Image (cartoon, rainbow, N blue to C red):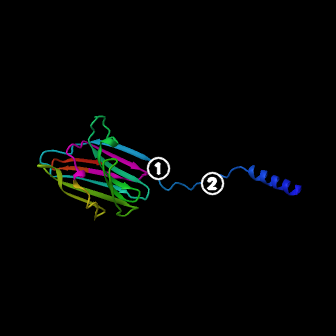
Amino acid sequence: MRITCLLFCAVTSSVLALPPLRPCLPAVAYADTETVTNVPFVAWQEHVGKFSFSLTCRTTPTNNVQAAFGTDSDGDGVLSLEESDLVVGWDSGGWFVQNGFDGERAVSVAGEGDMRPLEWTARLSPRTAIPSQITASAGGVAVFGGVDARIFYRRTWNMLRLTGRGLADSAESLTVRVLPDAVVMVVR
């Protein structure tokens, strides 16, 4: 019985003395980067009939590209999360629209793996601050049909924040148009 006990103790101490194994992790498939650009603009001018934008990005299962519209109320030249009224874009497998930075989010999957455009148009009237008609499509397919039109446009917007995560060297772009007075922004 003594011999068995000594043998068991010797085997146990040898196993506990081995160095820990460190597993090799696979290479990361997508870059983990973040870029942020803030662009001032004017969302309202007299006789404006349309507010539109298009966002084109590589739609992978892990990247995130979003455009936030809002009013830079503190005047620091940066649209903070709290100042964002509308956030739209692509997030890890689906297009989304969100009421503010922490509001309810509607998601629509319209394909992935290639450069896909999200196009948005709000028809405006000088008599009302609420868009009379909203059209949104992703790659030619209508999206976000049942979302409340009141979140899609504010006359007071003066700042756009474009954020991209996990983009590596892809060629995302954003175009914003306030027509007919030709206020056009193109961000790449």
Q: Return the residue nearer the eye: 120 or 8.
A: 8
Q: Position of residue 94 (x, y in %)?
A: 37, 59
Q: Residue furthest front?
A: 1
Question: Is residue 187 visible in this depiction of the protein?
Answer: no
Whether label 1 touches label 2, CB < 8 Å: no
Which image quarter holds the N terminus?
bottom right
From the viewer's perspective, is the residue at label 1 or at label 2 nearer?
2
Q: Residue furthest right?
A: 2
Q: Which mark is residue 32?
A: 1
Magenta segment includes 23: no
Q: Is residue 46 left or right of residue 146?
A: left
Residue at 47% x, 49% y: name it: 32
Badge 2 element: loop
Question: Is residue 108 visible in this depiction of the protein?
Answer: yes
Badge 1 amino acid: Asp
Magenta segment includes 153: yes
- Residue 105 versus residue 82 in the image, above or below: below
Residue at 52% x, 54% y: name it: 28
Q: Position of residue 150 (x, y in %)?
A: 22, 52
Gap between marks 1 and 2 measured at Cα: 21 Å
Q: Is residue 179 left or right of residue 93?
A: left
Q: Which residue is mark 2?
A: 23
Label 1: how many Cα within 10 Å (few below 14, some 14–19, many 20+): few
Q: How many marks?
A: 2
Q: Which mark is residue 19?
A: none
Residue at 88% x, 55% y: name it: 2
Magenta-tinted stretch: 150-175
